[in-house]
């Protein structure tokens, strides 16, 4: 009789300076089957990252010393590909916009239900790319201009085969555009196609991610690939 080999459990890092909340999240996620490591600040997180890479990080925004926004910007600047869900006590739109613009995958306001955090974390994990050697260039995929998308590995490459770092939700948007070229897509339609959910009222996350994609594509593209159609949405013109 052959025995099935269990898949390794995803590891989650929880970074929060509040010991009670940090322990509560750690215990809850452990009960849900995750391997969880906790850190009280950015320095402790760096010590964990020096040893291994998690599938995702649950990261508090308001911490003494280096805050969560600085940490996520630093991680994305190094093209780190783990999922990032940010926690904050600030319900204002400015904090949310900042977190998403720096590369966070999702954002949740304290106080929150642990079940909501779990649902958002699982959603982020489902969108993460499969591990692959950084130098691997996709043999097949969606080609447009000087770029190539690898839908299986969920990676973006330029014409020289060099990977361009994108977050999981940025990839979802770009793949949606690549599969619907020269079609005007409203923000609501984009959110449904890319993320499988309706766009929340006053939700600017799609606009923020498109702005990030524009900056990343502009370094290689000879002409803008993503155009705004005033009053209607966006069009991808490869």
Image (cartoon, helix red, strand yellow):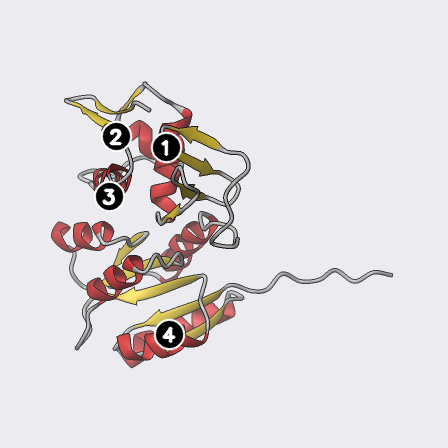
Dot 1 corresponds to which residue? 146
Residue 169 falls left or right of residue 187: right
Quote the CA–CA distance across marks 2 and 3. 17 Å
Going from N to C along the chain, the mark reached first, 1 or 2, is 1
Quote the CA–CA distance across marks 4 and 2. 50 Å
Q: Which residue is drawn at 32% across and 72% down?
A: 15
Dot 3 corresponds to which residue? 212
Quote the CA–CA distance across marks 1 and 4. 47 Å
Disc 1, disc 2: CB below 8 Å?
Answer: yes
Dot 2 corresponds to which residue? 222
Going from N to C along the chain, the mark reached first, 1 or 4, is 4
Circle 2 packing at 10 Å, graded few (<14), some (14-19), many (20+), is: few
Dot 4 corresponds to which residue? 24
Going from N to C along the chain, the mark reached first, 4 or 2, is 4
* Residue 23 shows in the view: no
- Taking depth in this image into account, of 226 and 8 the one nearest to the observer is 226
């Amino acid at each position: 009789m052959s025995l099935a080999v269990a898949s390794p459990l995803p590891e989650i890092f929880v970074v929060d300076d509040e010991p009670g909340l940090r322990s509560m999240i750690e215990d809850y996620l452990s009960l849900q089957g995750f391997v969880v490591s906790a850190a009280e600040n950015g320095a402790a997180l760096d010590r964990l990252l020096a040893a291994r890479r998690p599938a995702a990080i649950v990261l508090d925004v308001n911490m003494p010393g280096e805050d969560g926004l600085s940490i996520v910007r630093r991680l994305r600047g190094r093209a780190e590909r783990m999922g990032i869900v940010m926690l904050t006590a600030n319900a204002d739109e400015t904090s949310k916009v900042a977190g998403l613009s720096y590369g966070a995958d999702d954002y949740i306001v304290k106080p929150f239900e642990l079940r909501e955090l779990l649902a958002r974390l699982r959603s982020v994990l489902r969108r993460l790319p499969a591990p692959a050697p950084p130098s691997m260039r996709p043999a097949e995929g969606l080609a447009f201009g000087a770029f190539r998308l690898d839908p299986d590995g969920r990676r973006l490459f330029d014409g020289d085969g060099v990977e361009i770092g994108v977050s999981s939700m940025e990839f979802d948007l770009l793949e949606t555009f690549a599969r619907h070229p020269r079609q005007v897509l409203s923000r609501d339609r984009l959110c449904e196609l890319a993320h499988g959910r309706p766009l929340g009222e006053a939700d600017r996350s799609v606009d923020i991610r498109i702005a990030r994609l524009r900056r990343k594509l502009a370094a290689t593209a000879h002409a803008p690939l993503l155009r705004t159609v005033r009053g209607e949405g966006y069009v991808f013109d490869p």
